[in-house]
Amino acid sequence: MEQTITIQALIQMGALIMGIWGFYKVIMEIIKAITTRHDKEQAWDKAVDDIAVDRQALKTEFNARLDEQDAKIQQLYSMMCMCLRAQDTILEALTFNNIGNGDVREMRKELNKFISEQIGQ
């Protein structure tokens, strides 16, 4: 049994091979495009996650600094109150012992007014 291969058969076989090859290339390009997009989306998701982690770290650090500043402000406030009470006590002693003039009494009134307005809030 002898078979003859004609030019027409060779052309058809070549066209079939080229069609299969072209189909393979198209499929591979589609897979490459999908993979590239998937990789970009994963990179984007990772960047968003990294930003969220960094944001949380900054928030934690910011809150810690605020707490530290609040503690320092509270300490300064306590020191100021102590100094004002000491000044009031000194002015009271001066007034009680009749040391100084009317300016001492006036200053004590102004100091007590200031204390009641500012600190007594």
Image (tube, rainbow, N blue to C red):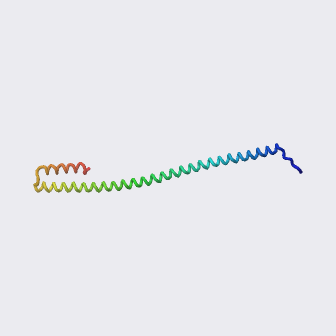
Nearest the eye: 21 or 101: 21
* Outermost right residue: 1
Q: Residue furthest top?
A: 8
Q: Position of residue 96 (x, y in %)?
A: 12, 55
Given the current orientation, which residue lies at the most extreme front position? Answer: 7
Horizontal side of residue 62 vs 94, given as left or right: right
Task: Tell me if 90 is positioned left or right of 21 in this view.
Answer: left
Pinpoint residue 66: horizontal percent, then vertical percent: 36, 53
Image mark count: 0
Q: Residue at x 19, y 55 (%)?
A: 87
In the drawing, does residue 88 fall left or right of residue 98? right
Q: Position of residue 100 (x, y in %)?
A: 11, 53
The residue lying toward the viewer, choosing from 48 and 74, is 48
> For the point 84% across and 44% down, which residue is it?
6
Residue for point 29% across, 56% down: 75
Task: Give the percent coordinates (x, y) of residue 48.
Answer: 50, 50
Residue at 16% x, 56% y is 90
